[in-house]
Amino acid sequence: MFPFNIQGEITLPSIAPGQVPIYLSQVERAAGEKRACNIRKTESLVTFRGGMFRLVMNWNIFVPITRGIIEVLPGTPGVVRYYFSCTEMLITVSVMVAIFAFCLLQPGLSTLGVVLPIVAWLWLFGMNYATAAFRLPGFVREALR
């Protein structure tokens, strides 16, 4: 099944317990620079909201994601886990394509009425998802520097 979330982890050689707040502050600042909403920092993680219904350019890194969670775990090696949800984009694109498909499913349109919505969904959701999956790990790495 196609994944609708982007998740992974970055391993650092070492993260001391005293470094966790520093890394979290860096992530919080980086998310703020990218105009994330509802940024919250706890003892070990930063959460925030993104989405396409914000006043940002469409190439903003957080447009395809609904929410993000970045967790910093101390140790040797240290681990930074990230989780980004893409449900808002999934629902929006699916509704748009369903309306498009309904308009195409008129008498006289056979395979075009079925194939075109599938291609539209794969392009609109699939390419945005693939772009986000490529860009977001780099954002996390850059925020940790």
Image (spheres, rainbow, N blue to C red):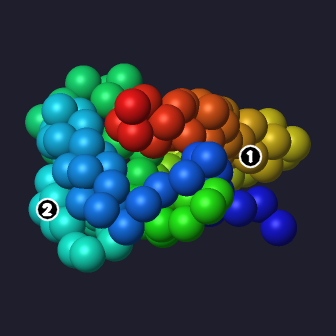
**Are there few (<14), some (14-19), or many (20+) residues within 10 Å of tag 1?**
some
Three-letter residue code for mark 1? Ile
Residue that extends furthest to the right in the rendered view of this protein: 111
Three-letter residue code for mark 2? Asn
Q: Are marks 2 and 1 in contact (CB under 8 Å)?
A: no
In the displayed structure, would residue 44 be above or below residue 2? below
Residue at x 45%, y 41% (from the top left corner): 140
Residue at x 74%, y 37% (from the top left corner): 119
Residue at x 36%, y 37% (from the top left corner): 143
Residue at x 81%, y 42% (from the top left corner): 115
Mark 1 = which residue? Answer: 118
Kindly report which numbered mark, 2 or 1, lies closer to the viewer in this rendering. Answer: 2
**Are there few (<14), some (14-19), or many (20+) residues within 10 Å of tag 2?**
few
In the displayed structure, would residue 90 be above or below residue 41? above
Mark 2 = which residue? Answer: 38
Hey, which quadrant is residue 127 in on the image?
top right
Residue 97 coordinates in the image, percent (x, y) = 55, 49
Q: Quadrant of the C terminus?
A: top left
